[in-house]
Amino acid sequence: MFDGHGPWGHVIAKRVNKSFPSSLLCQWQQTLASLSSSPECSSPFDLWKQACLKTFSVIDLDLKISPSIDSYCSGCTALTAVLQGDHLVIANAGDSRAVIATTSDDGNSLVPVQLSVDFKPNIPEEAERIKQSDGRLFCLDDEPGVYRVGMPNGGSLGLAVSRAFGDYCLKDFGLVSEPEVTYRKITEKDQFLILATDGMWDVMTNNEAVEIVRGVKERRKSAKRLVERAVTLWRRKRRSIAMDDISVLCLFFRPS
């Protein structure tokens, strides 16, 4: 899931979306070959983590040197999921979110478990990196509480995420494209996974999202139902703010 921002954001998101799967597979194959002589380092998670880290680095460099795309003040966040058997690997650079719905201990409800971090500039670890890189951490007057990373001279409106592809005007000031890679072994209690951009999570809680999907009779309509609900909530809660892009993907682990 790739959420673009800036004048070239939509172009960058489309390019990354097109190149990411093949690049990840290539890096996974290379990592598998390089670790074949070290069995202790070849667990499914180790392989996918290294492949994800390399893929994010390669794609970010590709954007930088591309003559056909202006990624200086544009970019996109990235949230990816790989399911191999019962191994789920999440790689996240940005503020999209992955939430899994798992059956409660008493078996009577579904419990949301967040599998990713919303990488905002004011998260302590992110803020420290930005400050160490001489980046500027600030809020716009009309968006109090929405922290941004910016250049030290204040030459831009800044960016409200601390990790993203592109945005090379900020890469020397604390913005990084390195993802956080996490792992979960899927069990019989896990029911489905929701991946969504921040446009949905800005107006909807993890629990609300899980309950909406749970109540949809036709699974193929689950993502659409979440988008529709998020649009309604935006109009109700944030009338004075332009609606953010909303993209959603639902992955079910069990047959219906």
Image (cartoon, rainbow, N blue to C red):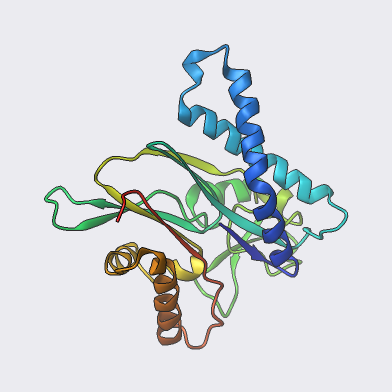
User: Where is residue 38 shown, x and y percent of the image?
Assistant: 54, 13
Residue farthest along the front direction in this orientation: 256
Q: Is residue 72 left or right of residue 55?
A: right
Q: Is residue 37 left or right of residue 117?
A: right
Q: Nearer the viewer, residue 153 or 242?
A: 242
Tally of numbered discs: 0
Residue farthest along the top direction in this orientation: 37
Q: What residue is at 56 percent from the left and 72 percent from the top?
A: 245
Q: What residue is at 62 percent from the left and 37 percent from the top?
A: 25
Question: Does 250 sit above or below residue 176?
Answer: below
Question: Does 43 sit above or below residue 224?
Answer: above
Q: Is residue 35 left or right of residue 57?
A: left
User: Where is residue 224 shown, x and y percent of the image?
Assistant: 44, 72
Image quarter for residue 72? Answer: bottom right
Q: What residue is at 60 percent from the left and 34 percent from the top?
A: 51
Q: Nearer the viewer, residue 172 or 153?
A: 172
Q: What residue is at 59 percent from the left and 46 percent from the top?
A: 129
Residue farthest along the left direction in this orientation: 106
Question: Does 77 sit above or below residue 132?
Answer: below
Q: Is residue 109 left or right of residue 147?
A: left
* Residue 160 visible to the viewer: yes
User: Where is residue 223 shown, x and y percent of the image?
Assistant: 43, 67
- For the N terminus, which image quadrant? bottom right
- For the C terminus, which image quadrant? bottom left
Residue farthest along the right direction in this orientation: 67
Q: Nearer the viewer, residue 196 or 166?
A: 196
* Residue 202 visible to the viewer: no
User: Where is residue 188 shown, x and y percent of the image?
Assistant: 25, 42
